[in-house]
Amino acid sequence: MINSSAGKKFTTVNIFICAMRNHTAIMIMPPQAAKSPMVMSFINGMINCAEKKSGVKRIVYTSLLHADTSPLNLAPEHAETEKTLKASGIDYTILRNGWYTENYTDSIAPALANGAFYGSAGEGKIASAAREDFAESAVVVLTEQGHSGKTYELAGDEPYTLAQLAAEVTKQSGKQIPYNDIP
């Protein structure tokens, strides 16, 4: 319950209705800390409120790559939200985004400062993509027909190891930056 300065009380449902009014499609993009029961309750509330009370006809949900089979601790919450969305009866599209390249490029400055790139991926390969690339996919799905009821697994084109990333940082910076794997 939220109290406004005018003394009116707004329930979460009323907030959803106001936020979604006059929109036929919405995109739900959960924060990285989606594991929070409060966040998941909020997202599920949006799904349940969308068509029944606000007129939204379609939801695009950004999930996790292979959410239904991934061992990552974020996967169960995304998989559960996908099930809720599918069972809601509202038209949906699910975008299962892979890892953002920015998750790694943000580590370049500390790697240069510390003389090494640290991680715990071993020889595992990552097919990351830039947030901008994922955003372009979302725009297509939101603005074009033919994506109803579909789930897209989205990732970058070329998988790489963190050792390869460290080698590229070395090449670009001219400073030797080894990859140190932390088991």
Image (cartoon, rainbow, N blue to C red):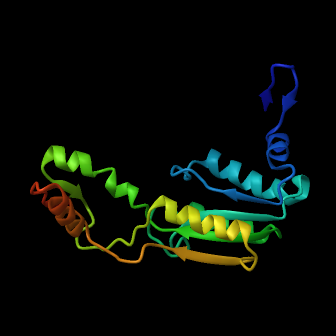
The percent position of residue 143, horizontal first and vertical second, equals 73, 67
Q: Is residue 69 above or below residue 21?
A: below
Q: Quadrant of the N terminus?
A: top right
The percent position of residue 71, horizontal first and vertical second, equals 44, 69
> Relative to residue 27, is residue 105 drawn left or right?
left
Q: Quadrant of the C terminus?
A: bottom left
Q: Is residue 128 above or below residue 5?
A: below
> Relative to residue 170, is residue 34 drawn left or right?
right
Q: Is residue 130 above or below residue 14?
A: below
Residue drawn 79% across the image and 45% down it: 19
Please tell me in which quadrant of the rendered image residue 164 appears: bottom left
Residue drawn 32% across the image and 55% down it: 105
Residue drawn 26% across the image and 71% down it: 161
Q: Is residue 84 visible?
A: no
The percent position of residue 158, horizontal first and vertical second, equals 36, 77
Residue drawn 17% across the image and 65% down it: 167
How many badges with numbers are in the image? Answer: 0
For this rendering, which residue is in front, 14 or 115? 115
For this rendering, which residue is in front, 150 or 136? 136
Q: Is residue 157 visible?
A: yes
The percent position of residue 49, horizontal first and vertical second, equals 83, 53
